[in-house]
Image: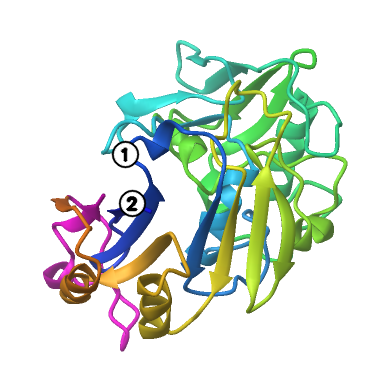
Amino acid sequence: MKRRLGAFATAGALLGVLFAAGAASAQKSGGILRSPFFDSPPSLSLLEESTFAANRPMMGVFNNLVMYDQHVPQNSMKTIVPDLATSWSWNEEGTELTMPLRRGVKWHDGEPFTAGDVVCTWDLLTGKAPDKLRINPRMAWYANLTEVTTNGDYEVTFHLKRPQPAFLAMLASGWSPIYPCHVSAREMRQNPIGTGPFKLVEFRPNEVIRVAKNPDYWKQGRPYLDGIEYSIIKDLSTRTLAFIGGKGDLLNGVTIPQLKDVKNQAPQAICEVVTSNTPAISSSTGTNHPLTTPKSGGRCR
């Protein structure tokens, strides 16, 4: 079977490698994407976690109000597009952000999505909800947020203390999913319910995370895949060997020097260098070092 190899830049000039059958696989429906994965997340709650071990497999379970256009290589304020919100507008003072919401969206358990879910999400994040997050790493993001109000079931307004144009960028982040009011924060750690293109099937810590296609997804024709399987293999060398041996379709975390070895053992790889803006982290101090910040990464198809 003919394969294509793809890589994506990640932290510390790391690369990922993607195998997909066929020349036009991105547009074909069906199949399970297998990904040897670098770590087991402490939980699956995106509001409580700060590691890509949770973010990567769980982003597809949820939707944001807005998101960055995935067809544009570099994120910017100009690339933000609607998701669960259908549009947005600021008041003249720049202190109120109003968003009409998409109708007819359902949570994975069949409950309807409404403006109340948006309020519940930010009440959790700001510590106002009766239910509490175990940890709240992004609470400081919303220090300028006074409250979120509703106008019926399908419109919300974010009220800010002072103008903050970058507030929209935070809402577009992969760390800003909408949570359901009717599911507890505790339940969301192991059995998250979202509105996204994939549903959680299984989470076995240190073994595997499986998600499957949401057949009732509100974006017609999506997702293309039937599911994704993340096999947790913490050692990079072991992950790489498993991938080369045909036990995976997507491999993230390959360093640039290692990429050459992967290509030598997978000559069908077609690779290109792409820009990365993720800083490297010093393993000894845990701080960012400008001299080690990568200016490029790689992508292979």
Left or right relative to 25: residue 224: right
**Extreme front residue here?**
1
Query: What's the residue type where badge 2 is placed?
Result: Lys
How many angstroms separate mark 1 from mark 2 (CA)?
Answer: 8 Å
Q: Is residue 60 above or below residue 29?
A: below
Is 18 a magenta residue?
no
Badge 1 vs badge 2, beta-carbon distance below 8 Å: yes
Q: Which of marks 1 and 2 is nearer the N terminus?
A: 2
Residue under the point 72% across and 15% down: 103
Please tell me how crowded label 2 is: few (under 14), some (14-19), or many (20+) other residues with Cα within 10 Å: few
**Extreme bottom residue here?**
284
Classify mark 1: helix, strand or loop: loop
To which quarter of the image does residue 60 belong?
top right
Q: In this view, does 164 lie above or below 226?
A: above
Classify mark 2: helix, strand or loop: loop
Q: Give the range drawn in magenta.
A: 275-301
Residue under the point 78% across and 24% down: 114
Please tell me how crowded label 1 is: few (under 14), some (14-19), or many (20+) other residues with Cα within 10 Å: few
Q: Can residue 126 be seen in this view?
A: no
Left or right relative to 237: residue 159: right
Most common secondary structure along the magenta stretch: loop
Query: Considering depth in this image, is 4 or 1 the residue closer to the camera?
Result: 1
To which quarter of the image does residue 54 belong?
bottom right
Q: Name the residue under label 2.
A: 2
Q: Which mark is residue 23?
A: 1
Q: Is residue 71 above or below residue 85?
A: below
Query: What's the residue type where badge 1 is placed?
Result: Ala
